[in-house]
Amino acid sequence: MNRKPDFKGGKPGPISAARPVIFSGAPTVTGLKPLQPVKKEEQPGVCEDNCCAPSSPAVRFTPVSSTTGPAKVLRPLAMPPAAPLCEADCCAPQPAIREDSCREACCAPAAESVAVAPGCCADKECSSSAASPAEAVATRPVTRLDYRVGGMDCPSCAATIVRKVTQMSGVSACDVNFSAGTMLVELSQPDVRPGVEKAVQQLGFTLDAERHNDADNYLIQGMDCAACAVTIEKHLLKTPGVEAADVSFATGRLSVRHQLTPEQIISEVKKAGYQAQQLSEAAPLVKTGRFGGLGALVISGVALAAGFLFSHLPVHPLIPVLLYALSIIAGGLKPFRSAWYAILSRSLDMNVLMSAAALGAAIIGQWIEGASVVFLFSLGTALQTRSIEKTRNSIRSLMALAPETATVRRNGEWVSTPVSQVQPGDIMLVKPADRLALDGEVVSGESGVNQAPITGESIPVDKAPGDDVYAGSINHNGVLEVRVSRPASDTALARIIHMVEDAQNRKSPTQSFVERFSAIYTPVVFVVALLIMVLPPVLGVGSWADWFYRGLELLVVACPCALVISTPVAIVSAIGNAARHGILVKGGITLEKLGSIRALAFDKTGTLTEGKPRVTGWQVFGGDPAQLLDIALSIETHSTHPLAAAVSAWAREQGAKSLDVSSRQVIPGKGAVATLEGTLWQAGNEKLFACVEFPPEIRSALDEMKNRGASLVLLGTENAVCGVFAISDAIRATTLSALKELRTEGMTHTLMLTGDNEGTARTIAAQAGVDSWRSELLPEDKVSVIEEWQQKGLRIAMVGDGINDAPALAAADIGIAMGGAGTDSAIETADVVLMSDRLEQLPHAFALSRLTATIIRQNIIFSLAIKVVALSLIFPGWLTLWMAVLSDTGAALLVTLNSLRLLRFLR
C-alpha cells in the first residue's frame, strides 16, 4: 500500500529587504534581517568573539532546547579542524551550513519571532541593530488548533485546504493529513480562528475540533439544549487567555485550553449562566440532585394555579396579574439569564426564543399565556435534563468503579496509598470482595475475579500468578498480590472511559446534518416571525395585537430543540449501553455504519478458533530429533506468533534447550530465520521454503497433515527440510451460535481470511459454517480481498485481533478488534473493540446499531411532524402560546425518553 501524503504549508514572518544569503545544501533564502549575537563581554559564556567572522569556514548549527519560549537556539556541531567554532550557544537559528559572509544576515532567523542578543558578529560592516537580552527571548505566542476534517475525497483536497488556509492573514502554518482526516493550524493571531473555520467550510469540508490532551476538563450543569453549549463556547472564546473551548451537550463536558486559573474559567462559565466543576482524579463529581431549581419550579407552578383560580373569583384584577408575574419571574429567572448571555454571545438559542415569547405575551396583556409559557418550559427542561443526565451518568458511573486508594507494600508494611502515588512495579494487596484499584500482574495468590466492567463477562475468571488483572474488577474469594503495571491515568478502565467520552463527542453524519439544518432553520423562522408581527398590520390586515401574538407563537415553534437532540442523545445512550456490555464503539459515525454492514470477514486464529494452537504431531525427515528441537526452540523462542509460541512450548515440554543465536529475523507472513554456528536455519510455512525442492515422501507427508486440517511449521536450512510440526487449533464453542445470530441480524456474507494452508482453512471454515474462505494470505493480501469485496458494492467489516490484522482492519468499512482489554494497539486501530474475546458480543453490537438508527429516524420524523402541525395551526388562530411551548418542550422530552430506551436494550 502506498502511504498517503500529508500536506504542509507555512508563512514566514515579516521580512526586510536584503541581498540574498546562500546556505550550502539549501534553497536560496532572501529578505532576512541582519542580526548580531551576543559579545562575550556582554553576556559571558554565550559566544566567543568572531564566532561568525566572515573569514571563518562553514559553520554548522544544530538546535538545542530553550526555556524561554518556542524560539530555537542553535548549538554548533563539531567540524573539521581549522575552523574557529562557538564554545557555547550561538545565535543562528538556521540549521544550515553557512558559507558566505555574515555581512547581510550572519545570524538571521527564519521568523520574526526569533530575536538575537547583540554582539555575535565581528564583521564591522554588519549593520544589524543591537537587541536587549529581554528582546533576545521575546517570542510571539502561537495558538495551535487541531481538527478532524470531513469530506476529503483525495489528497488534492488536502492540498486545496492548505493553499486556502496559508493564504490567510494570522496563519503561521497549516498541516492537513489526508490519511488521518486531520488538520493542524498554527495561528499567530488567535482571533482569526472563526475565519479559518469558515474558509474550510466554504470549500465544502466539515470541521470538528479535537480535544487536546493538555486541555482542562469541566463538568457543566444547567444546559437545556445543544444551543446552550454553543453559548458557552462563544462566551469563552471571547475571553482573553482562552485558546480553545469545546462543549459537548451530550456528555455535559467542557474541554478548554487556556492560560487562566480554574477559578477564572468557572467564573466565566457562571457569567454565561451555567455552573462548572473541574474534573480531576482528586475531585469527585458533585451530585446535583434529581431536579435542579425544583423550588423555583414549584413556586412558578403554584403561582400560575393561584392566578388562574383568582381570575375566576370576584377579586381585584391586579391580584391574578401579580400572581402570573410571580410565576414568570420564579420560573423564568434561569432561562432569562441564559437568554441574556446568549444574546451577548450572538447565539439564538431556545432560551432567547422562549424568553421573547413570555415577555411579549406579558407586554400585550396575555399574562396567563406568558406564565404558562414559562412554567411549561421550565418543567419540560427540568424533566429533559433529568433524562439526559441518565445517559451522561452511564459513563460517569464507570469512573467510580476503581477505588481512589490502593493497599501497597512500603518498607515491608501494607499502607493505604492514593492511586495517583502508586507507581508501576509496586506490589498491591487485594483482599476478597475488594475492587482492584490499578492494572497489574498477579505475583502471589489465586482467586476468581469478576472483570465485567472491562470485558462485559460477569462470570468470575480464575486468576493465578502470571495472569493480568484490571482496575475496577472485583476480587472474589482469595487474597492476591499484584505487581502494578500501569499508572492510574493509563489503566484499561481509564482508557475505556477516555475513548468512550471521545466517541460520544464525535458527531454522526445524521447529527451533523441536523445541526446544519437547524442553524439555517432557526434564524429564517425568527426573521419570518418578525415580519409577521410587522407587515400585516402595516398593510392594514388585522390588528397589531393579533399578529404580534402569532409572531410570538412562531418564535416558540422556531425552536428546533427536539430536532437537535434527536440524534446525540440516542448516540450517547447507545455508546453507553455498548460500553457496559464490553463493546467500545468509537463514535456516532461508526455506530451508524455498523447497521449498514452486510458482510463480515474473520481472521481465523484467535477469532473463529480458540487461538491456542498446540503441537499435535512432529515428524523428522533427517538429523537428530533432539538437536532439531533445540534449533526450533532457538528460532521461535522470541516470536509472538501463536504457531511459534506453540512450537516453543512443546519443545520445552520435550526437554529442548535454547542455543546461542548470532542473528535472528522474523519474516511476516512466512516465519523466522536464525543463524546458529554459521548455518542459516528456517522455521515457518512453505512460502519460506519456496526455493527448496521437496522429495516425494516429504510432500506426501505434508499433504496428509494438511488434509487433516493441521497447520504446518517446517524446520530446515536453505537447502533442505529436516522436520515438520503439525499444529491444530480448536474452533470456539460459541462460533457457530454467534454466526447464526449474525445471519438473523441481516448478515448476508461471511468470509474467513487466514495465512494458514488450504487444508486447515477448509477444515475450520467447514466447522465454523462461513460462506467462503481464503488461505495462505499475507497481511497485504487480506487488504486486497477486503477491497475486492468493497468493489462488489458490499459494506464489509473485518474482525481480527487488532495487531497482525491491522492493515485489514483499517481497509474495511468497519474494523472490529477482539480481546482489547490488554491490547493498546487494538483500541487504537479498530473502530469497534470487543474488550473480551467473545464473538457472541457481535450480534449485540449490530442489533444495537440498527435499533439506534431506527430510534433516530423516529425522533427526527416526530420532531419535524410536530413542527409542521404547530405551524399549520398558527395562521387559522387555533394555536395558543402554551400549546406552542408544549409542542416544543413536550416533543423534546418525548424524543429524549425514546432515546433512553437504548440504555436498557439487551438482545
Image (cartoon, grey):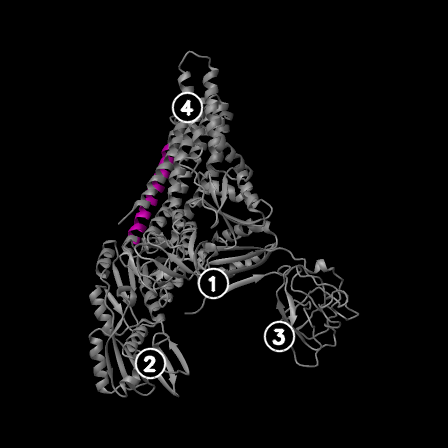
Q: As displayed, is residue 62 above or below residue 580?
A: below
Q: Quadrant of residue 369?
A: top left
Say which amino acid is labelled 2: Lys
Question: Quick check: is 379 in the magenta stretch?
Answer: no
Residue at which label 1 appears: 155
Say which amino acid is labelled 3: Gly
Residue lying farthest top? 314
Residue at which label 2 appears: 657
Residue at which label 3 appears: 25
Q: Quadrant of residue 41?
A: bottom right
Foreground pick, 613 / 363:
613
Task: Give how far across and how far down residue 644 sits, in percent.
Answer: 32, 75
How far apart are labels 4 and 2 at the CA level?
86 Å
Question: Quick check: is 851 in the magenta stretch?
Answer: yes
Residue 302 marker: 4
Magenta stretch: give its range: 845-869
* Residue 11 visible to an observer of this rendering: yes
How far apart are labels 2 and 3 at the CA level?
55 Å
Q: As displayed, is residue 684 above or below residue 881?
A: below
Say which amino acid is labelled 4: Val
The secondary structure type at the circle numbered 4 is helix
Dominant SS type (magenta): helix
Residue 370 marker: none
Q: Earlier in the sequence, mark 3 or mark 1?
A: 3
